[in-house]
Amino acid sequence: MKPIETLSNEHGLIRHYLDNLNLAADQIAAGRHPSEAFFDKAVDFAKTFTDGFHHFKEEHVLFVQVAQKKRGEVDAQLDALRHEHERGRTLVADISRALPGYAAGDPVKTGELVEALGAYTALLKHHIHVEDHVFYPMAERTLTAAELETVAAEFDKQHERHGRDTFERCHKTVVDMGSILTHVR
Ligand SMILES: [Fe+2]
Ligand SMILES: [Fe+2]
């Protein structure tokens, strides 16, 4: 698979995950209580897949290649994308912090959880939209076939490092999160 296509596929899984988060927030707003197990999986997916795997490949491989090729021309755009990754990490930490209080039924912490979920999903949906429609097409136009091969080889190393089954494993997490939500009371 071409490297940009690999990243776009990962966006598909992240979008599915974000839909689960939105649904969980709606359930809480409707007075229901998705389990802590759901949010444990949510935090694990954000750290393992979104940040540790997908954002890592963007920041440490693709962004670096594009920055070298464009010689400073797209630094502001890359800084904005990196900043959004960073903001995402902060919001995931906010979600984690609110969880013990949410589990104990604390209304203030529950409010903080819903707020952080809303901010995180809005941020990432926007971020993914920009990458899919603006940044990735530009990267594909900018890099030669040989440079894209280099990116693909680096991605392959990361897939080896994280485990070849990372996508399938994390896909299962998202499916499991969805099935937890169908049983929420
Ligand atoms: Fe990104
Ligand atoms: Fe991305």
Image (tube, rainbow, N blue to C red):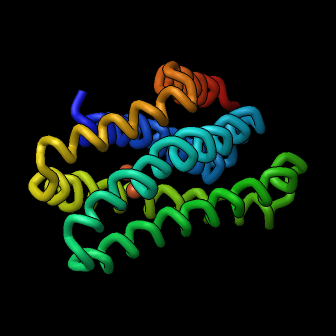
Judged left or right of residue 2, residue 50 is: right
Is 178 in front, or is 47? 47
Q: Looking at the rendering, which quadrant does residue 184 occupy? A: top right
Judged left or right of residue 107, residue 76 is: left
Any part of residue 74 in sight: yes
Q: From this viewpoint, which residue is outermost toward the right?
A: 104
Q: Position of residue 36 (x, y in %)?
A: 77, 38
Image quarter hosting the N terminus: top left
Say which residue appears at 33% left-offset and 53% top-offset: 62
Q: From what the image shows, is residue 34 above or below residue 164?
A: below
Is 94 in front, or is 77? 77
Image quarter hosting the C terminus: top right
Q: Position of residue 42 (x, y in %)?
A: 63, 41
Q: Position of residue 143 (x, y in %)?
A: 16, 53
Q: Looking at the rendering, which quadrant does residue 177 occupy? A: top right
Say which residue appears at 39% left-offset and 67% top-offset: 81
Judged left or right of residue 104, residue 136 is: left
Say which residue appears at 44% left-offset and 63% top-offset: 123
Is 48 in front, or is 98? 48
Q: From what the image shows, is residue 16 above or below residue 140?
A: above
Judged left or right of residue 22, residue 58 is: left
Any part of residue 178 in sight: no
Q: Position of residue 166 (x, y in %)?
A: 52, 26
